[in-house]
């Protein structure tokens, strides 16, 4: 039994199997003597050339937009965990609240990317992108509020900003002061180029909201 591979313009002959007749030798291709039967011939359209990344984005913009939101959201959340567990910057209550939208954005954007790749109804994908945009805008609002508290533009929550005045627990005031560990919301633990983590969260959330808004309006392939 011999298997030969051929290719010609427009179609690809993936395999030709020759089964020789029992008791007779099979001839070679050079001599043109074929003793056998062609068992199977699979012919399929020739594969297209691999597409570049810009071509893929242009061909499937909804999938690309959802994957972009997924990558940005996941990288941001991983960065927050890096600062917390590696750099040892404990998050304040407002920092933890700003992570909540990411718990919605990351899995939802991945589901939208899969749905867009499987050619789900356009209305369903548009609704998904709309929810992504709303969640990202909520994250931007939380970040802007926290940044304003850090710059003393408005007061923050009483449990993590301003003077600590809750001494209702039993025991001496000195013992309470020694045991209290408050991560303040009105003091930026880290800044880069004058922008705190809350400020960067505003910028990142607005970027994800813009990409999600693009996903709502993008024209999807039939």
Image (tube, grey):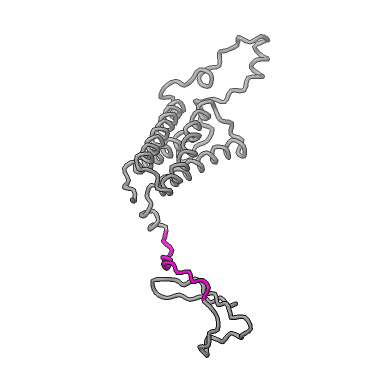
* Magenta stretch: includes residue 163: no
| Visible residue check, residue 10 | yes
The residue depicted at 44 percent of the width and 20 percent of the height is 155
Locate the N terminus and report the quarter of the image it occupies. bottom right
Q: How many marks?
A: 0
160 versus 55 height, above or below: above
| Visible residue check, residue 195 | no
164 versus 40 height, above or below: above
211 versus 168 height, above or below: below
* Position of residue 25 measured from the top left corner of the image (x, y, whole percent): 61, 86
The residue depicted at 51 percent of the width and 21 percent of the height is 161
* Position of residue 121 measured from the top left corner of the image (x, y, whole percent): 37, 43
* Position of residue 65 measured from the top left corner of the image (x, y, whole percent): 40, 46
The residue depicted at 54 percent of the width and 37 percent of the height is 80
Judge left or right: residue 83 versus residue 197: right
* Residue numbers of the magenta segment: 38-52
Name the residue furthest bottom: 31
* Position of residue 17 measured from the top left corner of the image (x, y, whole percent): 54, 74
Within the image, what quadrant is residue 213 found in?
top left
Q: Nearer the viewer, residue 200 or 9?
A: 9
* Magenta stretch: includes residue 42: yes
């Amino acid at each position: 039994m011999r298997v030969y591979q051929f290719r010609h313009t427009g179609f690809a002959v993936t395999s030709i199997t020759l089964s020789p007749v029992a008791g007779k030798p099979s001839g070679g291709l050079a001599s043109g003597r074929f003793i056998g039967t062609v068992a199977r011939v699979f012919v399929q359209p020739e594969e297209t050339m691999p597409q570049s990344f810009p071509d893929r984005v242009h061909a499937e913009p909804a999938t690309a937009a959802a994957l972009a939101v997924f990558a940005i959201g996941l990288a941001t959340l991983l960065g927050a965990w890096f600062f917390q567990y590696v750099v040892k910057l404990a998050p304040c209550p407002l920092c933890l609240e700003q992570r909540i939208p990411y718990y919605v954005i990351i899995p939802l954007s991945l589901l939208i990317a899969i749905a867009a790749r499987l050619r789900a109804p356009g209305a369903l994908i548009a609704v998904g992108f709309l929810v992504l945009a709303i969640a990202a805008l909520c994250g931007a609002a939380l970040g802007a509020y926290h940044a304003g508290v850090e710059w003393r533009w408005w007061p923050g929550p009483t449990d993590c900003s301003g003077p600590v005045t809750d001494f209702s627990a039993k025991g001496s005031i000195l013992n309470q002061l020694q045991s209290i560990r408050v991560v303040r919301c009105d003091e930026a633990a880290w800044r880069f180029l004058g922008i705190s983590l809350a400020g960067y969260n505003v910028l990142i959330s607005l970027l994800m909201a813009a990409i999600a808004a693009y996903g709502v309006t993008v024209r999807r392939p039939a």
